[in-house]
Image (cartoon, rainbow, N blue to C red):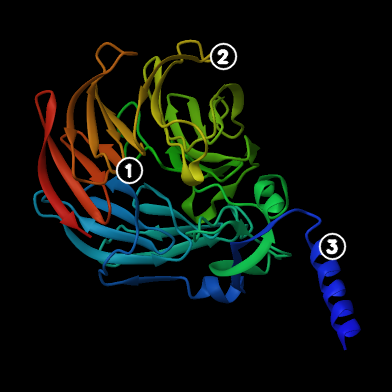
Amino acid sequence: MKKFAFLLSAILLALFVSCNDDGPYEDYQVARPILQDAITFKAEAVSITEPVPIESSGKIYAYGNYIFVNDVNKGFHVIDNQNPSAPKSIAFIKLEGNNDISVKDDKIYADSYGDLVIFDISDINNISISGRIVNAIYNNDVWATNIEYPQADFYVYGDIDYDRDIVIGWEVVTERRSVEEYESRYNCDVCAVDALESFSDGPQPNIGQGGSLARFKIIDDYLYVVDYSNINIFNITDVEDVKVLDDVQVAWDIETIYSQGDILFIGGAQGMYIYGIENPEKPKFISEFRHGTACDPVLVDGDYAYVTLKGGNFCGNSESGLYVIDISNLENPDLKVIYPMDGPNGLGIKDNTLFVCDGDSGLKVYDKTSAPNVTLINTFENIIAYDVIPLQSSLLMIGDRTLYQYEYVENDIRLLSTFEL
């Protein structure tokens, strides 16, 4: 009996040692995607309903007397803003997998799990869907759905058929894995995920206005949509027959798009990329400005680009800050000044005033008359600031499930209304 016990102990010890060849083990949180058939899912993913409370406020878009607020991956809320002192919700456009919109001539162009969906809002009280182009932006790719990722140490994708399945959520379990695997997870096939229309030259006729975090941008008869690696181009001259043109590959980490004249400025986690659109169907690379890994919206005014870098968490390893870059020579962008920030998101410009949403640190207002040097003139604290849209007579800002509107007062702004979504 003692010999058997000794032999059993020896076998267990040998197994333990062999299992630990890769080093020490610890418990880690592992997230695996929950899948659903894409065809069935998309058929149920769109409807027009009465106003509902917002769950997770995302980007904002202004068109005429209306404001559209994205409910991350759920759709967007329609707000009547004819009286900015007392805005009111009038509808919710349920659109699963939606994060961005752009509007021209009473037509909303929106994303939905890689599809381009078009709505008719010529009668705002009778909104209707007028078209859907399947997989026009991407093919249900988990990297581009922008599903809200849970906190986890590993994200396991397995063998997903993106033409057939769509990711609708995550299941998180505790698993024992080697510390070595955890430390090298960014270099393997099981990786943590990187988390994640503004206007220049004033509003264009019949085209709305978005914030600096937008992935959609309409310029004349073309819609430009950035996914996580490409510029997707659509000719929307005929809304009944939208032309899907060839993509232009940029980088793997694209986040935002902005334009000034016939130049596109693409913000990515690794840098800012500049493209010319003299031929609007074929954007041509001009140059890039590289920085450390960080979430990166871009705003351009004249000879300067203003870039907010948000480090930490999913955004990367760079220090958070406002970068002011000289772009007078588009082929050689030149960093001029860096201003430390706490957790910046979107930004906007009205004349010589620069607005920066600094997350939990609130909305910061700068005088940029002496650009590239900017001077802080006011801070609106005790609010969460996500993105802004400077309009002609007022400023829109989205925070945590709250829409703020400010009126311009000389060189500053004053709160006009607060609307809980």
What residue do we see at 54% from left, 34% from top? Answer: 293
- If you read the primary sequence from the N terminus, does the residue marked by circle 2 or circle 3 appear first? 3
Secondary structure type for disc 3: helix
Which numbered mark, 1 or 2, is in the foreground of this view?
Answer: 2
- If you read the primary sequence from the N terminus, does the residue marked by circle 1 or circle 2 appear first? 1
Answer with left or right where residue 172 lies relative to residue 372. right
Q: Position of residue 209 (x, y in %)?
A: 32, 41
What residue do we see at 44% from left, 40% from top? Answer: 217
Kindly identify the amino acid type of the residue bearing the numbered disc 1: Gly
Q: Residue 18: which disc?
A: 3
Q: Position of residue 418 (x, y in %)?
A: 14, 51
Residue that numbered label 2 is attached to: 331
Answer with left or right where residue 10 lies relative to residue 305. right
Mark 1 and mark 3: Cα distance apart in space: 63 Å
In the image, is residue 10 above or below residue 21? below
Q: Position of residue 103 (x, y in %)?
A: 37, 48
Which is more toward the observer, 64 or 336? 336
Quarter of the image that includes the C terminus? bottom left
- If you read the primary sequence from the N terminus, does the residue marked by circle 1 or circle 3 appear first? 3
Residue that numbered label 1 is attached to: 208
